[in-house]
Structures are given as structure tokens and as C-alpha cells.
Amino acid sequence: MEGVLTWVPAEWVAAGLAGMPGVDVQVVGLGRDMGESGAARVPASPASPAPANVADVEFYVPSFFPSPAGTAVLAEMKRLRVVQTLTAGVDWLRPHLPPDVTLCNARGVHDASTAEWVVAAILGSLRSFPAFTTAQAAGEWAYQGTDQLAAKTVLIVGYGSIGAAVEQRLSGFEVTVRRVARGPRDGVAGLADLPALLAEADVVVLLVPYTADTAGLADAAFLARMKDGALLVNAARGAVVDTAALVAEVSRGRLRAAVDVTDPEPLPPGHPLWSLPGVFITPHVAASTPVSRQRAAQLVRDQVLAYTRNEPLRNVIDGAY
Ligand SMILES: NC(=O)c1ccc[n+]([C@@H]2O[C@H](COP(=O)([O-])OP(=O)(O)OC[C@H]3O[C@@H](n4cnc5c(N)ncnc54)[C@H](OP(=O)(O)O)[C@@H]3O)[C@@H](O)[C@H]2O)c1
């Protein structure tokens, strides 16, 4: 092989690179693909032998849900220059990244899908869709009034790429939006203002990356600051929330929650979150849509092209996330 050896996790990613000069593409799926059911593939074990040319890989795109083998293989990639994830979050990869390898995430790719999930989760929870779905399954005409989104205050904690997309989508819903990020700026508060903002919000949306600073950010004190009856929406990472503290607040009927991500993940059978009234759970699906796939394939194409042309890469992670 003479071109840039590029490992991609699936045929749909490879298709985006078809015909690109100076690139040798190989499909090596070490994990679960986007949109693939959990049962569809047994993830390779860390002991599975990688293809023989592993040491020549220069550009690596891991699976959307990598298996341990998908990250362990990094240690064998002696010529590796770039890791391009299909995910916006890179917390799962950071501990395995060899020094001097450029890491790029998929910031922007999942904005539409994830923001849509957030809006759907807010509306579904406030309008009691989970309860109506349960009643429908039982064939019951269970009339009841519901809450609504209009006139509410929505606090976005982690006002980045997806946070802004959420605000854009909420613009027709007659809500007041408040924003928090690491660095305060015009219209966006810093962490110092978080306690006061939590006390005023009807809906709190978590969209921070998972880092040492955000681990357990939504702890007992954070949740205690939230209004009675408020809704916590977690589309970030499960461990951003102290799950035991959330279970305690929801069990008392003080808070509601809609979560796409949990700690642990997958949430094991019998976990208290499954059966708590007021909790809506989806299995980390917010970004798993055709439009995210399309945009991820385009990003990989753009990045590989830029790399082969010695042009700057997008979404280079040089800080904590
Ligand atoms: N559920 C899913 O399927 C799914 C899909 C996509 C993404 N995600 C998660 O969503 C996260 C956000 O994605 P994104 O693309 O919007 O990222 P992003 O554009 O990098 O935005 C992250 C935001 O979080 C803020 N932030 C970072 N650390 C913080 C802290 N300690 N306290 C408060 N705010 C903090 C940042 O503040 P500054 O602007 O001041 O830096 C930024 O506003 C990802 O990292 C990923 O974990 C989940």
C-alpha cells in the first residue's frame, strides 16, 4: 500500500472516501456501528488480533460505539497521525490516545439529531407522552391534563454547538432560555451563576462534555437547587449526573428526568431508574439518525482530504475536550 492507510469502522464511512487519491481505505469495525442494534454484533474482545497492517495505519476512525479492542488497538498503530471520532464526546478515547497523535471530534455533526432529541424529550415529558404510551399499550383511554412548555424557563448547561442548536429549535415555543458555559460571555453565564439560574429554571438541559470538571456536576447540591417539579434532561454523559442523588430526588416526586445517557451504561435490568415514575429513558440514541450518519461521513471525507493535502484539520481537540 502506498497511500495514507485509513481505517474506518463501516462501509458507509468508506463510501465517502471512495476514489480519493493517495488514500488506502480499509473497513475495520471494532465496535458497534451507529444505528446498529446491540445484539447485531458481538464486539471484538481486546484480545482479538487486529489486521496485520495495523502498524501502518496513519488515519483512524474508530467505531461509533467502540469495543475495548477499538481503543486498545491504538497502542499498535506505530505510524498513527490522526484519530477522527464519529462522536462529539471524546471522553472514552482520551485515556488511550498515544502522544503526538492529533485527535479530532465530530463537533457539529450531531447538533440537529441531538437537539431534536432534547426538544422531543422535553415536550414528551411535559406532555406526559410516556404515561399515554403506557395507557395505549393497555388499551386505556386515560384522560388527564398535562404540563406544557410555553411560559417555561429552560436552562442549557453547556451552551456549545448542540446547546445553540437546542435554543434555535426552542425559538417557537414561547420559552425563556438561559445559558451556562465554562467561560462567561455575552448572554452566556459562567458557572458562578449556576446556583441562581438552577433555582429559576423549569427545565435544565445538560450538554457539557464529560471531563474531570463535569464528572458529577449534577450532584445532590445541584439537584437540590432545582425547583420543585422541574425536569432534568441529560443528553451529555451519564456520569455528569450523580445517579443516586437523582434517584432520591425523583423518588420523592420532587424532580422529573429525561435521559438519553446513564451511569452505568447500558442501564442494567432492575436499576431503580427504570421503574421510577417521572423518568423517561432512551438508550443513548440522540445522535443515531441518518442525518448524523450523512454528516459524519462528510466530515470524515473532508478531514481525510485535508490531511492528504496538508491543510488544517477541523475540530482538533487541544484542551480538555
Ligand atoms: N446523547 C448523545 O447521543 C450525544 C450526542 C452528541 C453529543 N453528546 C454530548 O454532548 C456534549 C456536548 O457536545 P457539543 O458538540 O455541544 O460540545 P461543545 O460545542 O464543545 O460545547 C460544550 C459546552 O460545554 C461547556 N462546558 C465545558 N465544560 C464545562 C463546565 N465544566 N461547566 C459548564 N460548562 C462547560 C463549554 O463551555 P465553553 O463554551 O465556555 O468552552 C461549551 O459551551 C459532548 O461532549 C457529548 O458528550 C451526546
Image (cartoon, helix red, strand yellow):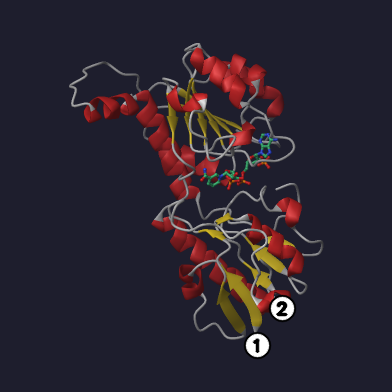
- What x and y, as percent, mark residue 31? 56, 58
- What x and y, as percent, mark residue 216? 67, 29
Residue for badge 2: 56
Q: Is residue 291 above or below residue 195?
A: below
Rendered residue at 65%/30% (across/down): 189
| Mark 2 Cα shell of 10 Å, populated few (<14), some (14-19), many (≥20) | some
Task: Say which element carries label 1.
Answer: loop
Q: Is residue 177 above or below residue 17?
A: above
Taking 105 as reference, is 174 left or right?
Answer: left
Residue lying furthest bottom in this view?
2
Q: Is residue 249 above or below residue 45?
A: above
The foreground one among 95 and 170 is: 95
Rendered residue at 27%/16% (across/down): 145
Q: Amino acid at mark 2?
A: Asp
Taking 87 as reference, is 190 left or right?
Answer: right
The foreground one among 65 and 122 is: 65
- What x and y, as percent, mark residue 173? 37, 31
Q: Is residue 310 visible?
A: no
Rendered residue at 41%/53% (across/down): 289
The foreground one among 60 and 36 is: 36
Mark 1 vs 2, N-terminal side: 1
For label 1, being within 8 Å of ligand 1 is answered no
Q: Looking at the rendered structure, which numbered label has been put on residue 144?
A: none
Q: Amino acid at mark 1?
A: Met
**Residue 133 lies in what quarter of the image?**
top left
Q: Are marks 1 and 2 in contact (CB under 8 Å)?
A: yes
Q: Is residue 165 above or below residue 193?
A: below
From the image, which quarter does the N terminus lie in? bottom right
Taking 199 as reference, is 79 left or right?
Answer: right
Residue for badge 1: 1
- What x and y, as percent, mark residue 176? 47, 26
